[in-house]
C-alpha cells in the first residue's frame, strides 16, 4: 500500500489554513457523514471550546484509547447525560470567569431518545451551551436499530420489512418542534451537504449567550445502505426533496428557511438507499408508502414555505455553490 | 435527662418549637437534642417532635418512648387515640386552650395545665402561633431553665417586632402558670 | 506497549499515528480530461485554460496562454465561427460561456496595453524556413516557427500581410486598425517580411527549396471556381470574391438594382451585406445549403457564420435556402432573371450524398445581376508540380505532402477548413512538424485527449447565471465601415470567466479539501490556484471516493490500488 | 464555634466552607435540607457558587462530573431512589477518577415504598469505585465532609459521605463548626490534573479495549486501596487543627480485656454507647465503629478483633438471598486468622425501624446461644408475616 507522498503531509497538516478540531486517523466508516459533520462544526467553533460527547459512533470512532482524533478538550461520560455534563462544564467555566464555549454533541439516539430529558432541562436552564445533534436516523453504533428519528417506512434491524410490515411503522419524531417549545434563543437544522450553511449556523449558535441547538443531517453509508462516495449526494437530495428542510428558529419561531428552487421528487432520494429498497418492489403497499413519504415532504415544503419563487439554481439559493479559488466556502 | 414530646399539626411550627426549646437549653449550658417524628410531613395532619435535655452529652439517636412531658398545641389533640402513650404516671401535660381553668387531672390521671396560647399569640404577634407561649409556660412550670435562655433562643430565629412581640409574649405566658409546679417530675429521671 | 494514563485519557491528535490508508481499495488521483471547447477549437486553443487565468484576475497570463496556440486573438475574437461555444458543456446547463467575446477582449486588451509575445527572437545561426503567403495560416506558421527558435522569411504577394483577412473581410467585421496591429505584432516578433513577391512570378519553388531549410505554402485560394448553368454564362458575370476584394481595396461597387448571389459561405453573406449597405434594392442569396437552426446538421447548414447570416437577414438580405439555380434567363447576353428549384441533399446507397431537385417547385426570380460565390481554388501558378491539376493541395492533417519532404501546406489552399481559426491551426501544426523535420525528431501524432462529458461534471455546485452578451449595433445605425459587434466590459469578462465549469481541470474550489471525511486532502497553500496545490494524504485516506464524486469539474478519479 | 444546629444545616455550612464552585442536586427527602441550606448561603452571597438545579439525580451527578472535570470543585447530595438513579454516572465518575464529593442522607429503597432511614442505598453503591465514609453523629458528619474534599482532591477519587437520613440530618444538637480560616488551612484550593482546558486539549472518557481494560480496573482498585493513607492523614491533620479525631478508617471503644465486640456503622453507635453505659452488668464489650466502607480496612479490623470470642456485626442493610453485606466482608477479612471470633451477622433498623437502647442487651443475649447467627434480621416480629413467609 505504501505510496510515495509528494509532500511531508504531517508538516502540511500543521500549516492548514483552517483550524480543524477533529483530525485524521479516526475509525469512522468510509464516507462517514458524521465524521465530516463533526469536523466542520469544529472548523466553525475554533479551538477555544470544550466538548461533551454522548455515547455513540462519534465517541467510539474518535477516541479508542490510547488515541484520540480530537484537538479540542473533549469528554465522554455516558449515553444520556451529555447535556448535563455540558451544563456542569459551563457552570464551572462561568465560575472561573473563562470565555471558553461549551459544545455538547450527540447522535439521534442520544438526543431524540435517551438524552432528551437532560437536553430539555439544559435548554430550560438556558445554559450557554451549543448542542449539536448528528442525526443519522438510527442507532448505528449498535448496528442499525430504529430510533425515534428513523424515518417512516425505513428499514432497520428492529424495523425490518416483512410480509406484514413496510419498515418502521411510526413517524419520525418532530424534535425541532420540541426544541422550539423551549423558546431558546437559537435553533437550526443543517446538512453535511451544505458546509458553509452548517458552519454559519454553528457560528450563530455559538455567538449568542444562552442555549442553542443545531440538528445536522449526517448520512450513514452503512445504515442507510449507500456507497461512501454518495454521502453528500444523499444528504443533498434530502434537502432538495424537502425531506430534511434547512431552517433557523429564533426564540422558537421560524426565522429563515433555505428555499428550494428546483424541488426533486422524494423517490430520487429514496432509491439511492438500501434502507428504502423494499419501497420499490412494485407492491401496492410499497407504492402507498412512497406516496406517504412524498406527502410528508410536501408537508414540509408547505410548512416551512420552502418553494422558492425565483427559478434557477438546482438546489437552494446557490448555497455552497463553488467558484474558482474556493471563494464561496464561508 | 428530661424528655419532652410536642404534639401538633403540620404547619403549626411543631418541629420549630422542639428546635427552639433545645436551642434554649443549649444557651443555658445544657446538652440538648431535638428531632421530628421522621417521615413526610403534611399540613394539618397530627405530627410530633421530641426534645431531650440533659447535663451530660446525649449520644443516643433512638426515639423518645417515655417522655416526662407532653405539649399539645391544641386541645382537640386530647382526643387523639394513644396521645398519652408512654407517658408515665407522674407525667404532665401542657395544653393550649382558650378556656381558662386551674390545673386539673386528665382521663389517665395525668396532671394537666392549660393556657390560651393562641389567644396570647394573636394579642402579641397578631398570628395564631401558640408554640412560643407554650414553651415559656413549660420551662416556667418545670424550672428546666430561666426565661432568658428562651429569649436567647428566640433571638437566633426572630428579629425586630417579631422578636420583641415574642419576648413580651413569653413573659406574659410565664406569668400565667405557677412556677416550679412540675419541678419534681423534671428532676425525677437521672439517666 | 503503552503505559496506561490515569483514567485512560489521550493526548490531542494522537490518532494520526494510525494509518487508516490501509483500508483503501481504490485511491483518488487527479486526472485531467480535455474540455470540449479545447477539443473542438480549430486553432487548437484551450479556452478553459486561459479563462481560468482571467478568473484569477491575471489578464496578461490569460493572453499569453491564449497566444501559445493562436497569435491573432483580436482577429479570431471577431471573425471566428466559435465551435467552442456550441460544444461548451455549460450550454446544456443554461447558456454556453461567451468564449468568443472573452477571446476578443483579451486580444483588444493586448493591443491596448501593447503586450508582446512571450518569445525570444531566434538565433541568427538557426535554420530558416520560407513561408509563402501572409494570411492567417502563414502568419500562424511563422509565429510558431519562431516560438520554436527557427528563423522565418515570409513572402507576401501583396504589399501588406493579412491575406484574405485584408482582401475580403469587410471592416464592419474586422476593423483595419485591429488587423494591421495584430499582423504587425507577428512580423515585429522577428519575421523577415518580403512583400510584393508572388510565387511563380517573383520567385520559384526550386529557389525556395534551395535557399531554405523548409517551405510552408499558404497561398490561399486565388482563383474563383468556374461557374455556369448548363454552359450558359452571362457576359458581365462578376465573381463574388472579386467584387468583395474590389470593394475592400477600392471601396467602390458597380451599381445593381436586383442581385442574386449564389452560395452559402461567408463570402456570399459578406457580399450580400456590403451590397445591401451600398443601397442595392434587392439582394438575394441562393444556396442549396440550409439556414442553420434546430434539426439542421452542420454538414447541411450554410457554411457562413450563423450570427452573420442572422445579421444579414436583419439588414434585409433575402435568403433562399435549399434552392438550386435551374436556368438563367438571358436577354441580349445579359441576365434578367433566373429559375430556382427546391433541392435537398439526400443520402444514397453507400453513404453517398446527392443533391436532388424536386420537380414542380421551380420559381422565377427577376434580377439584373447574378454573382456566383461558390468558393475558390488554388492559383496553380508556380506550384503546378505540387497541385497536379487539382484545385487544392493534397496533404495530411499536419500539412505534409506525400513524396515532397520539406514542403508543407496549410490554410484555404488545403481545401479542408476554409476558416480563419482553421488556418491558424494549420500553421501551428505545420510549424510543429517542420521543427520535427528539421531536428529529426518525431511529432506527437493524433488529437487531444478524451473530451470530458456533461454527465461527468457535478453540477450541484453551480448556480445559474446569465451569459454576458456583446453589444450589437442596431440595424438602422449600421454601415459598411463601422464595426457591428462591440466588446465586453472587464466586469462582464470577470463574471463570465467565473461561469466556466472548468471541465476536466481543477478549479481550486476546495471541495475535496472541505468534504473529505477523513481530513485526508491537504492544501499546500492558503489560496489554491490549481490541482498542484492539493495533496492526498494516502497514509490516512480510506478511499471512500467522496472527493471524486463531489468534484464539480470531474477532475478526480478513483483508481484501483496496485 | 459550637452552636445548637440541625444536622443538615451544619453539613451545608461545612460544605460551603470548602468553597465548592458548582453545586447541583435534585430534591429528595431527607437530603433536601442540605441543598436548601446551600441555596440560602448562595442567595445571601455567603457562598460564591453556581447552583445548578437539575431535573434528576442522574443529571445532578453528570453536572458535578462535568464541573469537576472542567476544573471546579463540585458537590452534590442525594439518597435512596435518587442515588440509584445516579448509579450509571457514579460508576463513570469512579472510573474516570474525578474528585467530586457527595453526601448520601441514607434512606431505604422501595418497594415497598418507604421514606425512612436505612443504608441500603449507599451499600448498593459499594462497588462504584468511590471512597465511602459513614458518620456516627452530626459532629462527625461536619468534620468528615470537610475531610472528604481534601481526600477527594489528594487521592483524585470521588468521595461519598454517608449520614443516616432523619436520624442525623433532621436532628438539632450542639455542633462545633470550624472557622473558615481553619478550613482554608486544611482544604487546598481545587486543582485537577486532567482538567478540560483548550490550552492542553486532552480527551477524557475514551473507549478502552480488552487489551487494557483489565489494567484500568486494577489501577482503580489499587488507588482506592491506597486512598486509606489519605483518609487517615486527613483525619489526623484535621484533628491537629480542630482537636477532633474520628479514628481514620475505624475506631475501637471499650476495655482491652473485653472478649465480645459489636461492630456497627453509622448513627446507631451513639445509642449503643449509652446502652453500654446504662448496663455495666452485662460485662465488658468493645464497640467497633466502621467509618470507611471503601476502602475496606482489613488490617485495622484484624487488629481490632484480636482476642475476641464473639463479634457481632450490626448493619442497616442486607443482600436478600445472601445476608449481611458488611457481615460477609468482615467474615472474609477475618477468615484467615488462626484464632478467629464467632461472627454474628445481624441487620436491623430497616426502613426507619427504631433501634432502641434495649437492642444492646438483646444482642448480647442472642450470642449466648450455642450456635452463632450466620445471618439474621434483628427485631423481627414474625407474627406480622403469613406463615409461609416467616
Image: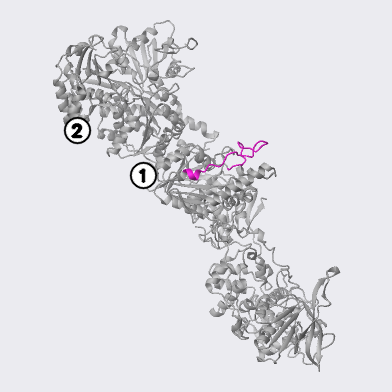
- Asked if the residue at tag 1 contacts the one at tag 2, i.e. Cβ–Cβ closer than 8 Å, the answer is no
Quadrant of the rendered image containing residue D243: top left
Residue C149: quarter of image: bottom right
Q: Counting other residues with Cα less than 10 Å from the Cα at mark 2, is it few (<14), some (14-19), or many (20 or more)?
A: few
Image mark 1: chain: A
- Number of numbered discs: 2
Q: Main secondary structure of the magenta part?
A: loop
Image x and y of residue D376, in percent? 43, 12
Front disc: 2 or 1 = 2
Q: Which residues are magenta?
A: A151-178
Q: Residue furthest top?
A: D370
Quick one: which residue is furthest to the front in this view? B99
Location of residue C21 with respect to C377 vertically, above or below: above
Q: Is residue A46 magenta?
A: no
Percent coordinates x, y for residue C521 in the rendering: 56, 54
The image position of residue A306, as x and y in percent, is 54, 54
The dot on residue D353 is: none
Work out whether B74 lies above or below C26: above
Q: Which mark is residue B159?
A: 2
- Checking the image for residue A94, the label placed there is 1
Q: Is residue C543 visible?
A: no
Q: CA distance from mark 2 to mark 1?
A: 36 Å
As helix, strand or loop, the secondary structure at mark 1 comes to helix
Task: Tell me the chain of label 2.
Answer: B
Q: Is residue B142 left or right of residue C152?
A: left
Residue B85, located in which quarter of the rendered image?
Answer: top left
On whether residue A161 falls in the magenta region, the answer is: yes
Few, some or many C-alpha atoms within 10 Å of disc 1 (few <14, some 14-19, many ≥20)?
A: some
User: Going by the image, does D387 lie left or right of B74?
Assistant: right
**What residue occupies the far bottom of the structure in this picture?**
C332
Amino acid at each position: 500500500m505504501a505510496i510515495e507522498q509528494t509532500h511531508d503531509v504531517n508538516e502540511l497538516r500543521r500549516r492548514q489554513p483552517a483550524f480543524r478540531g477533529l483530525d485524521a486517523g479516526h475509525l469512522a466508516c468510509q464516507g462517514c457523514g458524521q465524521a465530516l459533520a463533526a469536523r466542520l462544526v469544529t472548523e466553525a467553533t475554533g479551538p477555544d471550546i470544550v466538548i461533551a460527547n454522548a455515547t455513540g459512533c462519534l465517541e467510539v470512532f474518535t477516541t479508542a484509547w490510547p488515541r484520540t482524533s480530537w484537538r479540542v478538550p473533549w469528554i465522554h461520560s455516558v449515553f444520556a447525560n451529555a447535556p448535563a455534563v455540558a451544563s456542569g462544564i459551563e457552570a464551572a467555566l462561568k465560575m472561573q470567569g473563562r470565555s471558553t464555549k461549551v459544545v455538547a454533541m450527540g447522535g439521534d439516539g442520544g438526543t431524540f431518545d435517551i438524552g432528551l430529558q437532560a437536553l430539555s432541562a439544559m435548554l430550560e436552564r438556558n445554559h450557554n451551551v451549543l448542542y449539536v445533534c448528528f442525526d443519522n436516523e438510527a442507532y448505528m453504533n449498535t448496528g442499525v436499530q430504529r430510533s425515534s428519528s428513523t424515518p417512516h417506512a425505513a428499514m432497520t434491524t428492529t424495523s425490518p420489512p416483512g410480509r406484514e410490515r413496510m419498515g418502521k411503522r411510526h413517524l419520525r419524531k418532530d424534535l425541532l418542534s420540541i426544541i422550539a417549545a423551549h423558546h431558546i434563543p437559537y435553533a437550526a437544522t443543517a446538512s453535511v451537504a451544505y458546509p458553509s450553511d452548517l458552519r454559519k449556523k454553528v457560528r450563530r449558535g455559538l455567538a449568542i449567550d444562552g442555549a442553542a441547538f443545531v440538528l445536522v443531517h449526517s448520512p450513514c453509508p452503512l445504515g442507510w445502505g449507500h456507497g461512501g462516495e454518495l454521502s453528500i449526494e444523499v444528504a443533498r437530495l434530502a434537502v432538495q426533496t424537502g425531506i430534511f428542510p434547512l431552517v433557523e428558529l429564533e426564540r422558537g419561531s421560524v426565522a429563515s428557511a433555505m428555499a428550494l428552487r428546483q424541488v426533486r421528487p422524494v423517490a430520487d432520494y429514496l432509491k439511492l438507499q438500501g434502507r428504502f429498497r423494499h419501497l420499490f418492489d412494485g407492491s401496492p403497499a410499497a407504492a402507498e408508502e412512497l406516496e406517504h413519504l412524498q406527502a410528508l415532504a410536501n408537508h414540509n415544503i408547505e410548512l416551512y414555505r420552502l418553494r422558492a419563487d425565483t427559478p434557477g439554481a438546482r438546489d437552494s439559493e446557490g448555497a455552497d455553490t463553488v467558484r474558482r479559488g474556493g471563494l464561496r466556502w464561508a | 435527662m428530661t424528655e419532652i414530646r410536642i404534639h401538633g399539626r403540620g404547619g403549626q411550627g411543631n418541629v420549630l418549637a422542639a428546635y427552639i426549646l433545645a436551642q434554649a437549653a443549649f444557651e443555658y449550658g445544657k446538652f440538648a437534642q431535638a428531632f421530628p417524628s421522621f417521615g413526610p410531613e403534611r399540613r394539618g395532619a397530627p405530627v410530633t417532635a421530641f426534645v431531650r435535655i440533659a447535663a451530660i452529652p446525649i449520644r443516643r439517636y433512638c426515639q423518645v418512648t417515655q417522655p416526662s412531658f407532653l405539649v399539645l398545641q391544641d386541645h382537640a389533640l386530647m382526643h387523639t387515640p394513644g396521645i398519652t402513650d408512654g407517658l408515665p404516671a407522674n407525667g404532665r401535660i401542657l395544653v393550649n386552650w382558650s378556656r381558662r381553668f386551674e390545673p386539673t387531672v386528665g382521663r389517665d390521671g395525668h396532671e394537666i395545665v392549660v393556657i390560651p396560647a393562641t389567644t396570647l399569640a394573636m394579642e402579641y404577634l397578631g398570628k395564631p402561633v401558640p408554640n412560643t407561649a407554650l414553651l415559656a409556660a413549660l420551662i416556667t412550670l418545670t424550672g428546666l431553665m430561666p426565661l432568658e435562655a428562651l429569649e436567647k433562643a428566640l433571638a437566633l430565629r426572630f428579629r425586630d417586632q417579631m422578636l420583641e412581640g415574642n419576648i413580651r409574649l413569653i413573659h406574659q405566658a410565664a406569668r400565667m402558670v405557677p412556677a416550679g409546679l412540675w419541678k419534681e417530675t423534671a428532676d425525677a429521671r437521672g439517666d | 506497549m503503552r503505559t496506561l494514563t490515569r483514567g485512560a485519557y489521550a493526548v490531542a491528535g494522537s490518532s494520526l499515528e494510525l494509518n487508516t490508508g490501509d483500508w483503501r481499495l481504490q485511491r483518488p488521483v487527479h486526472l485531467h480530461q480535455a474540455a470540449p471547447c479545447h477539443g473542438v477549437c480549430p486553432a487548437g486553443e484551450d479556452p478553459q485554460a486561459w479563462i481560468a487565468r482571467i478568473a484569477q484576475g491575471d489578464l496578461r497570463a490569460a493572453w499569453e496562454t491564449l497566444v501559445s496556440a493562436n497569435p491573432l486573438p483580436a482577429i479570431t475574437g471577431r471573425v471566428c465561427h466559435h465551435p467552442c461555444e456550441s460544444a461548451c458543456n455549460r450550454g446544456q446547463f443554461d447558456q454556453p460561456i461567451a468564449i468568443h467575446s472573452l477571446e476578443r477582449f483579451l486580444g483588444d486588451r493586448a493591443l491596448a496595453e501593447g503586450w508582446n509575445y512571450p518569445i525570444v527572437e531566434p538565433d541568427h545561426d538557426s535554420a530558416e524556413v520560407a513561408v509563402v503567403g501572409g494570411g492567417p495560416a502563414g502568419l500562424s506558421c511563422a509565429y510558431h516557427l519562431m516560438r520554436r527558435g527557427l528563423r522565418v522569411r515570409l513572402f507576401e504577394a501583396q504589399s501588406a500581410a493579412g491575406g484574405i483577412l485584408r482582401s475580403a473581410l469587410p471592416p464592419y467585421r474586422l476593423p483595419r486598425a485591429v488587423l494591421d496591429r495584430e499582423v504587425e505584432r507577428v512580423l515585429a516578433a522577428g519575421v523577415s517580411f518580403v512583400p510584393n513577391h508572388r510565387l511563380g512570378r517573383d520567385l520559384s519553388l526550386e529557389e525556395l527549396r534551395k535557399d531554405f531549410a523548409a517551405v510552408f505554402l499558404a497561398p490561399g485560394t486565388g482563383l474563383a471556381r468556374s461557374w455556369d448553368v448548363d454552359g450558359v454564362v452571362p457576359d458581365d458575370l462578376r465573381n463574388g470574391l472579386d467584387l468583395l476584394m474590389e470593394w475592400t481595396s477600392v471601396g467602390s461597387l458597380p451599381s445593381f438594382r436586383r442581385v442574386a448571389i449564389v452560395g452559402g459561405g461567408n463570402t456570399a453573406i459578406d457580399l450580400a451585406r456590403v451590397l445591401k449597405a451600398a443601397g442595392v434594392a434587392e439582394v438575394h442569396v441562393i444556396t442549396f445549403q440550409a439556414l442553420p437552426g434546430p434539426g439542421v446538421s452542420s454538414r447541411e447548414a450554410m457554411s457562413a457564420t450563423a450570427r452573420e447570416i442572422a445579421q444579414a437577414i436583419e439588414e434585409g438580405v433575402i435568403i433562399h435556402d435549399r434552392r438550386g439555380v435551374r436556368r438563367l434567363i438571358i436577354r441580349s447576353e445579359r441576365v434578367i432573371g433566373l429559375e430556382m428549384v427546391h433541392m435537398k441533399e439526400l443520402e444514397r446507397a453507400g453513404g453517398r450524398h446527392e443533391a436532388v431537385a424536386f420537380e414542380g417547385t421551380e420559381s422565377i426570380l427577376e434580377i439584373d445581376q447574378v454573382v456566383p460565390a461558390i468558393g475558390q481554388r488554388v492559383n496553380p501558378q508556380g506550384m503546378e508540380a505540387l497541385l497536379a491539376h487539382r484545385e487544392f493541395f493534397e496533404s495530411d492533417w499536419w500539412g505534409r505532402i506525400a513524396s515532397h519532404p520539406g514542403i508543407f501546406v496549410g490554410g484555404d489552399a488545403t481545401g479542408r477548413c476554409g476558416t480563419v481559426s482553421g488556418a491558424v491551426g494549420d500553421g501551428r501544426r505545420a510549424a510543429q512538424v517542420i521543427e520535427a523535420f528539421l531536428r529529426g525528431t518525431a511529432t506527437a501524432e493524433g488529437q487531444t485527449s478524451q473530451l470530458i462529458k456533461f454527465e461527468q461534471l457535478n453540477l450541484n455546485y453551480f448556480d445559474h447565471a446569465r451569459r454576458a452578451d456583446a453589444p450589437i449595433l442596431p440595424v438602422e445605425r449600421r454601415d459598411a465601415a463601422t464595426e457591428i459587434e462591440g466588446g465586453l466590459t472587464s466586469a462582464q469578462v470577470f463574471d463570465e470567466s467565473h461561469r466556466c465549469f472548468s471541465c476536466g481541470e481543477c478549479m481550486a474550489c476546495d471541495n475535496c479539501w472541505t468534504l473529505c471525511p477523513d481530513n485526508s486532502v491537504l492544501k499546500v497553500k492558503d489560496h489554491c490556484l490549481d490541482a498542484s496545490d492539493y495533496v492526498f494524504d494516502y497514509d490516512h485516506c480510506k478511499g471512500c471516493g467522496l472527493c471524486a464524486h463531489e468534484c464539480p469539474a470531474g477532475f478526480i478519479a478513483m483508481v484501483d490500488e496496485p | 464555634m459550637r452552636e445548637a444546629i440541625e444536622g443538615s444545616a451544619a453539613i451545608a455550612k461545612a460544605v460551603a466552607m470548602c468553597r465548592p464552585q458548582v453545586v447541583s442536586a435534585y430534591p429528595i427527602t431527607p437530603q433536601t435540607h442540605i441543598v436548601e441550606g446551600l441555596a440560602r448561603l448562595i442567595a445571601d452571597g455567603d457562598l460564591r457558587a453556581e447552583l445548578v438545579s437539575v431535573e434528576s439525580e442522574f443529571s445532578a451527578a453528570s453536572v458535578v462530573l462535568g464541573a469537576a472535570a472542567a476544573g471546579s470543585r463540585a458537590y452534590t447530595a442525594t439518597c435512596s431512589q435518587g442515588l440509584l438513579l445516579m448509579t450509571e454516572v457514579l460508576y463513570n465518575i469512579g472510573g474516570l477518577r474525578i474528585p467530586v464529593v457527595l453526601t448520601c442522607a441514607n434512606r431505604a429503597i422501595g418497594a415497598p415504598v418507604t421514606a425512612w432511614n436505612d443504608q441500603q442505598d449507599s451499600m448498593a453503591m459499594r462497588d462504584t469505585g468511590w471512597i465511602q465514609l459513614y458518620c456516627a453523629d452530626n459532629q462527625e458528619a461536619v468534620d468528615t465532609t470537610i475531610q472528604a474534599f481534601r481526600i477527594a482532591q489528594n487521592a483524585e477519587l470521588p468521595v461519598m459521605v454517608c449520614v443516616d437520613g432523619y436520624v442525623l440530618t433532621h436532628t438539632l444538637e450542639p455542633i462545633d463548626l470550624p472557622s473558615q480560616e481553619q478550613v482554608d488551612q486544611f482544604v487546598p484550593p481545587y486543582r485537577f490534573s486532567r482538567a478540560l482546558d483548550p490550552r492542553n486539549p486532552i480527551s477524557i472518557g475514551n473507549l478502552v479495549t480488552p487489551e487494557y481494560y483489565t489494567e484500568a480496573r486494577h489501577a482503580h482498585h489499587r488507588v482506592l486501596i491506597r486512598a486509606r493513607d489519605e483518609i487517615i492523614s486527613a483525619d489526623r491533620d484535621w484533628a491537629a487543627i480542630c482537636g477532633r479525631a474520628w479514628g481514620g478508617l475505624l475506631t475501637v471503644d471499650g476495655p482491652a480485656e473485653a472478649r465480645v465486640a459489636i461492630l456497627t456503622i453509622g448513627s446507631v453507635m451513639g445509642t449503643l454507647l449509652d446502652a453500654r453505659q446504662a448496663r455495666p452488668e452485662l460485662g465488658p464489650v468493645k464497640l467497633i465503629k466502621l467509618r470507611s466502607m471503601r476502602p475496606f480496612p482489613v488490617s485495622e479490623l484484624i487488629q481490632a478483633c484480636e482476642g475476641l470470642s464473639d463479634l457481632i456485626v450490626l448493619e442497616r442493610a442486607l443482600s436478600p438471598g445472601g445476608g449481611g453485606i458488611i457481615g460477609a466482608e468482615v467474615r472474609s477479612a477475618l477468615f484467615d486468622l488462626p484464632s478467629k471470633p464467632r461472627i454474628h451477622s445481624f441487620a436491623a433498623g430497616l426502613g426507619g425501624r427504631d433501634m432502641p437502647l434495649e437492642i444492646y442487651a438483646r444482642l448480647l443475649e442472642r450470642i449466648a446461644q450455642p450456635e452463632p447467627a450466620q445471618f439474621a434480621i434483628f427485631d423481627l416480629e414474625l407474627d406480622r408475616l403469613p406463615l409461609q413467609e416467616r
